[in-house]
Image (cartoon, grey):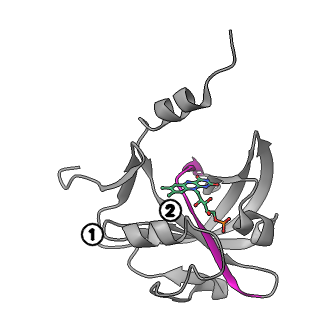
């Protein structure tokens, strides 16, 4: 078969609804860093683990993700669209204007999320132009009622209330 047109591949994958997360951690100098990721999923229950797929060019990946390093995984809620877009950018100003404070292990914790998981990196596995990061979940907090954000057809949507 001829090589797959990447545009067709992207169009197909845009049909797959995904949750929206922000990973935050600290770089080698202690500065807060973070990135928006939708390629995140539950991996294991015993032990509790998740996986997150980072583009190899991610500054967050390069600065702060290695075996044993901690990070927070925030599952964004409806109303946090601006946070999703802020952490999808590049550079050091992502945290400006974002409601955050030092949380577990001193990691940057964003408030108002649907859920927040405290994670520790287990492994980095190559996956094409991404790195698959597996991580142990050591603690998590679930908010009372916010609806999560969903990324579908390249746009952010709230989960319908009936869901
Ligand atoms: C809704 C949405 C989902 C995204 N999902 C991912 C993802 O799963 N993996 C990834 O590497 N980048 C993803 N991105 C792009 C990153 O957020 C973007 O490349 C960001 O600039 C990375 O920041 P960094 O280089 O500071 O780590 C996503 C962006 C958006 C808007």
In the picture, measured across the screen, residue 117 lies left or right of residue 69, that is left
Extreme-left residue of the structure:
162
Which one is in front, 121 or 54?
A: 54
- Give the image location of residue 63, x and y in percent: 78, 72
Query: Is residue 78 something one can see in this rendering?
Result: yes
Q: Residue at 38% across / 67% down in the picture?
A: 81
Q: Nearer the viewer, residue 121 or 20?
A: 20
- Looking at the image, tell me whether mark 2 or mark 1 is earlier in sequence order: 2
- The spot of residue 20 in percent (x, y) is 46, 58
Disc number at residue 127? none
User: Magenta part of the protein: which range?
Assistant: 30-45
Task: In the rendered view, tell whether residue 31 sits above or below residue 86.
Answer: below
Picture coordinates of residue 122 (x, y %)?
Answer: 76, 59
Secondary structure at numbered mark 1: loop
Find residue 79 and report its image quarter.
bottom left
Q: Which residue is mark 2?
A: 21
Residue drawn at x 53%, y 27% is: 8
Mark linked to residue 145: 1
């Amino acid at each position: 078969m001829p090589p797959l047109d990447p545009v067709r591949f992207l169009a197909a994958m845009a049909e797959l609804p995904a949750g929206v997360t922000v990973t935050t951690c600290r770089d080698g100098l202690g500065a807060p860093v973070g990135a928006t990721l939708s390629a995140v999923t539950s991996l294991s229950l015993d032990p509790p683990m998740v996986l997150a797929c980072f583009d190899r060019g991610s500054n967050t990946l390069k600065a702060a993700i290695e075996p044993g390093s901690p990070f927070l995984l925030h599952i964004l809620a409806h109303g946090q669209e601006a946070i999703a877009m802020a952490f999808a950018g590049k550079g050091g100003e992502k945290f400006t204007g974002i409601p955050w404070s030092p949380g577990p292990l001193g990691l940057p914790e964003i408030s108002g999320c649907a859920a927040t998981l405290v994670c520790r990196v287990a492994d980095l596995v190559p996956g094409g132009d991404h790195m698959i990061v597996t991580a142990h979940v050591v603690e998590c907090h679930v908010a009372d009622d916010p609806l999560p954000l969903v990324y579908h057809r390249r746009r952010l949507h709230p989960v319908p209330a009936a869901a």
